[in-house]
């Protein structure tokens, strides 16, 4: 695929990745009623599992939401994020920005129950997509019908996680990263609202707090009070690898507070704060800050779009989500 004409390797990979993505996008047929006859109780089983786990551990909802994003951005929504490393292969979950990937046991539990109810029927990729919807609804966000029928991939490579957007990205870089997956600026702004939930480690925002640039010690787009708080939470010689800050002042509730804090300069990540500094995204941020139901509608629509990225038809239904069949 276009191999001989692309000299720099990275360009080459990007090109073939895009071609593969386009090919799979045009073929994919997802359906809200996919399991109606083969496993009618599938969504109930998944919701029950996710709900129980979330009651025991409030970290579960944000982790599942991030898992879905990570899965779909690397190789499409094919459950490649769930595969365990083997002696021959370092998998995605052991790739560099894996610090917040966790709670895989919840997907495993749902899969075990599904294999008892309807063996070899519900893909791991569909479990993540349904669970991601459930955690959003459960924490106060919108509900939507999840399209299903994804198959599980057989490849998971740690090196590919380099294709995830970084918290240091500017809006141009973010737009490009989303455009590669067929997602637009509105999707970017809506989906970034996923940071209404959860937690970040210091390493993801530390560069904004000290020696930011040759002219500014602190990132000037950050609210002063927030900067001072974050400096205290993430001291210079930080020995606590678990230190960090919640992504929102209401980080267990899915709401549009994310955008209201964004307008006030109170975002932890540079990539989130940048959405207010650029004319292409700023007006959307302002609209979501004013109107939560607009945000909810657009978030749901963008999650459905995200769930279609790179979906494969010719894959398998894994029996165990951590290992390919
Ligand atoms: C726009 C580009 C994005 C960037 C640069 C980004 C970056 C990050 C980073 C750096 C973290 C914290 C990792 C850590 O230090 O623990 C994080 C956490 C999180 N992200 Fe994103 N993310 C992006 C988009 C998304 C999207 C689209 C979603 C879902 C719709 C999402 C959901 C989450 C959630 C829920 C957490 C919290 C995880 C937890 O509490 O364990 N992110 N993200
Ligand atoms: C993250 O990757 C490192 C190795 O790169 C690994 O030791 C660690 O277990 C991984 N974390 C998770 C949650 O998988
Ligand atoms: C965004 O970042 C890229 C890469 O660092 C840089 O080339 C570009 O000039 C930046 N764009 C804006 C608008 O700041
Ligand atoms: C700040 O960054 C500059 C280069 O960007 C470096 O030369 C300097 O040593 C840094 N200062 C501190 C206090 O880390």
Image (cartoon, grey):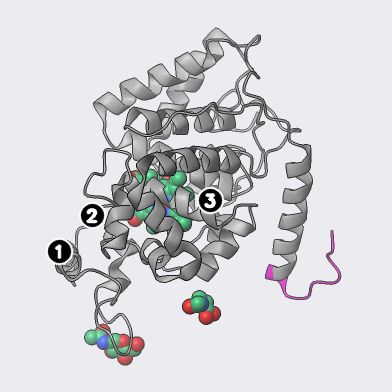
Q: Look at the numbered disc 1 and give the secondary structure of its residue.
A: helix
User: How far, Cα to Cα, is label 2 from label 1?
Assistant: 9 Å
Residue toward you, 44 or 161: 44
State the quadrant of the N terminus. bottom right
Q: Is residue 314 left or right of residue 241?
A: right
Residue on which disc 3 sits:
187
Residue 267 drawn above or below residue 193: below
Circle 3 packing at 10 Å, graded few (<14), some (14-19), many (20+), is many
Membership of 7 in magenta stretch: yes
Circle 1 packing at 10 Å, graded few (<14), some (14-19), many (20+), is few
Q: Are marks 3 and 1 in contact (CB under 8 Å)?
A: no
Q: Is residue 227 left or right of residue 293?
A: left
Q: Look at the numbered disc 3 and give the secondary structure of its residue.
A: helix
Say the numbered circle drawn on residue 245: 2
Residue on which disc 1 sits:
229
Which comes sooner in the sequence, label 3 or label 1? Answer: 3
Residue toward you, 80 or 89: 80
Q: Quadrant of residue 216?
A: bottom left
Horizontal and vertical percent position of residue 308: 64, 39
Residue 98 drawn above or below residue 254: below
Say the numbered circle drawn on residue 137: none
User: How far, Cα to Cα, is label 2 from label 3?
Assistant: 25 Å
Instruction: Name the residue rendered at 53%, 32% in the picture.
Output: 129
Q: Is residue 230 left or right of residue 184?
A: left
What are the residue bounds of the magenta stretch?
A: 1-10
């Amino acid at each position: 695929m276009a191999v001989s004409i692309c000299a720099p390797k990275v360009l080459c990979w990007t090109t073939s990745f895009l071609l593969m993505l386009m090919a799979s996008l045009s073929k994919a047929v997802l359906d809200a009623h996919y399991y109606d006859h083969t496993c009618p109780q599938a969504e109930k089983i998944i919701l029950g599992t996710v709900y129980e786990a979330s009651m025991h551990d409030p970290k579960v909802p944000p982790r599942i939401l991030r898992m879905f994003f990570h899965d779909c951005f690397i190789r499409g929504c094919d459950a490649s994020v769930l595969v365990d490393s083997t002696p021959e292969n370092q998998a995605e979950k052991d790739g560099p920005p894996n610090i917040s990937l966790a709670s895989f046991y919840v997907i495993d539990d749902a899969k075990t129950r599904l294999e008892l109810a309807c063996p070899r029927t519900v893909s791991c990729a569909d479990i993540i997509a349904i669970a991601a919807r459930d955690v959003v609804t459960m924490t106060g966000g919108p509900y939507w019908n999840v399209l299903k029928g994804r198959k599980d991939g057989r490849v998971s490579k740690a090196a590919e996680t380099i294709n995830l957007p970084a918290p240091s990205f500017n809006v141009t870089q973010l737009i490009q990263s989303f455009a590669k997956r067929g997602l637009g600026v509105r999707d970017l702004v809506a989906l970034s609202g996923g940071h209404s939930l959860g937690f970040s480690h210091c390493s993801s925002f530390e560069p904004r707090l000290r020696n930011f640039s040759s002219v500014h010690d602190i990132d000037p787009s950050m609210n002063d009070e927030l900067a001072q708080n974050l400096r205290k939470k993430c001291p210079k010689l930080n020995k606590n690898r678990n230190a960090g800050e919640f992504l929102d002042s209401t980080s267990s509730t899915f709401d549009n507070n994310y955008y209201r804090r964004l307008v006030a300069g109170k975002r932890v990540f540079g990539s989130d704060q940048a959405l207010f500094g650029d004319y292409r995204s700023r007006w959307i941020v302002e609209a979501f800050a004013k109107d939560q139901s607009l945000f909810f509608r657009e978030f749901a629509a963008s999650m459905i779009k995200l769930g279609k990225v790179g979906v494969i038809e010719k894959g398998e239904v894994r029996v165990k989500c951590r290992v390919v069949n």
